[in-house]
Amino acid sequence: MEASGACSAADRRRGGAGGPPTRDREAARRTGKVNGASDILAAAVPGLLLFGAVADLVERRLPNRLCAALAAVALLWQFLQGPYRIWDPLLAALAVFLPLTWAWSRGWLGGGDVKFAAALGIWSGLDGLPDLLLVTALAGGVIALAMLLRPWFARGAFVVLASLSVAGLRPAAALAAGLSGPARGVPYGVALACGGLWIWFQRFTTG
């Protein structure tokens, strides 16, 4: 009985009076750190997507650094959800990359669009890939229609954006310049960003 009492006292000193054992507390602490890192990475995704949408809308260009940053953030986030399933997002990226590379070889897409889409494949994973493709296709259709109707509404939008640019908003000035210039290709990066944001909202705003 005395030995048992001594062991109990030692256990209480290691784990704290009335608290969980030290091993459990360390595991909980590690889990908390992983969850915190996962939340930080997830919070960065909308900013990267919006940056890409604006860059493609204004310059018709998706920077390589942006695509690499999005891919790295998405891959690390997926890894933190469970290292054993890391092949899932990589397969999703490959499923997007191969057909879009063929489209790029035909001159239908820019290289930045292909890389941006592959990074979003990592973000969505195989389970989110159908939703990503569906929302991207719908957004792309809306954008293509807007491009067709551009001559009718561009003048009014130009006046509004030009007024904002006078107020010192540089992004508005760039958009105004884009609207006043000649028509260019469809900014597929905007549609892809819409698909990526849809996946984000599904994961973090729905129960």
Image: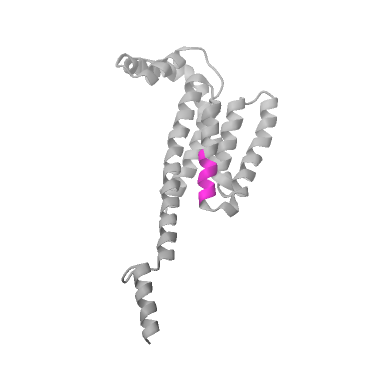
What residue occupies the far top of the structure in this picture? 181
At x 50%, y 19%, the residue is 59
Determine the image quadrant of residue 153: top left
Q: Quadrant of the C terminus?
A: bottom left
Judge by depth and name the residue closer to the eye, 34 or 194.
34
Side (left or right) of 196 relative to 4: right
Q: Position of residue 199 (x, y in %)?
A: 49, 44
- The quarter of the picture where residue 109 lies is top right
Instruction: Confirm whether residue 13 shows in the render.
Output: yes
Span colored in magenta: 73-80
Give the residue displayed 56% in from the left and 32% down from the top: 116
Q: In x, y percent, where is residue 70?
A: 52, 35
Q: Residue at position x 55%, y 47% from top?
A: 128
Verify whether residue 134 appears in magenta. Answer: no
Image colouring: one colour
Q: Position of residue 123 (x, y in %)?
A: 54, 42
Q: Residue at x 51, y 24 (%)?
A: 56
Q: Position of residue 77 (x, y in %)?
A: 50, 45
Count of numbered circles in the view? 0
Toward which corner of the image does residue 40 lie, by quadrant?
top left
Decide if residue 142 is in sight here. no
Give the residue furthest to the left.
167
- The outermost residue toward the bottom is 1
Q: Reply above or below: 71 against 110.
A: below
Drawn side of residue 129 relative to residue 157, left or right:
right
Can you say whether 21 is above or below 137 in the image? below
Image quadrant containing the N terminus: bottom left
Q: Nearer the viewer, residue 57 or 124?
A: 124
